[in-house]
Image: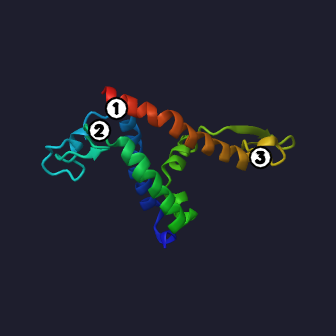
Amino acid sequence: MFAQLPEPRMHWVRWVLTVAWLTIIASLLYDPWTSALTEPDHPWSPLRLPDTCIQVQGECLVEQPYPLGTTLFWGAIVPAAIFILLVFGHELWRRICPLSFLSQIPRALGWQRQFKRENKKTGKVRYELAKVEPNSWLGRNYPYVQFGWLFAGLCGRILFFKPLFYAMATLG
């Protein structure tokens, strides 16, 4: 279904998704605006906090406005990526993934790591891309390395990043 979409259109889709993705990531670090959407007296926001008292163990819970970057990133963006991958498949995800798009910038600018190869007989010079050898340690163990980084990122999110962002939100 998505294979019929022309590559120039997908290029613009990737640009829009990448800019939105980078904006949300930047909002994780600094976001003075979206907490206004969660204020109880906001006139139109569906995300505003209720004016009524929410009782937790018999006491009213004090709610304060909070920035939405963390909620959006972990509650919408990451699950949407997983949903797209599971429902539409790898082919669409490969074409729209912002991280993959950003990783292609050095290639587009000609900053790839290359080896200079010279033909001894003709003297003709050509350049080959540097690739991971299939028999090297990384070539044999790349799935474990990828899974290890995924595991470290998820554990880091739970143990370090989420408490850090909540601490930053309460200070700001």
Instruction: Classify residue 113 by image quadrant.
Output: top right
Mark 2 highlights which residue?
Answer: 66
| Of the two numbered discs 3 and 1 in the rendering, the one whose residue sits closer to the viewer | 1
Mark 3 highlights which residue?
Answer: 141
Q: Which amino acid type is shown beneath numbered disc 3?
A: Asn
Quadrant (top left, top right, bottom left, bottom right) of the C terminus:
top left
The percent position of residue 80, horizontal first and vertical second, equals: 44, 57
Horizontal side, residue 133 vs residue 93: left or right: right
Q: Which amino acid type is shown beneath numbered disc 2?
A: Tyr
**Sequence-wise, which precedes: disc 3 or disc 1?**
3
Horizontal side, residue 54 vs residue 134: left or right: left
Mark 1 highlights which residue?
Answer: 169
Horizontal side, residue 41 vs residue 171: left or right: left
Looking at the image, do the residues carrying marks 2 and 1 touch, with CB atoms under 8 Å apart?
Answer: yes
| Of the two numbered discs 3 and 2 in the rendering, the one whose residue sits closer to the viewer | 2
In depth, the one of 46 and 1 nearer the eye is 46
Residue at x-position 55% and y-position 37%: 156
Q: How far separated are the C-alphas under marks 3 and 2?
A: 42 Å
In depth, the one of 47 and 76 nearer the eye is 47
Q: Which amino acid type is shown beneath numbered disc 1?
A: Ala
User: Callout 2: 10 Å neighbours few (<14), some, many (20+)?
Assistant: many
The percent position of residue 138, horizontal first and vertical second, equals: 76, 42
The percent position of residue 34, horizontal first and vertical second, equals: 26, 40
Horizontal side, residue 114 vs residue 150: left or right: right
Q: Secondary structure at mark 2?
A: loop
Q: How far separated are the C-alphas under marks 3 and 1?
A: 39 Å
Residue at x-position 74% and y-position 38%: 115
Residue at x-position 51% and y-position 49%: 101
**Sequence-wise, which precedes: disc 2 or disc 1?**
2
Outermost residue, front direction?
58
**Sequence-wise, which precedes: disc 3 or disc 2?**
2
Q: Is residue 53 visible from the viewing direction of this image?
A: yes
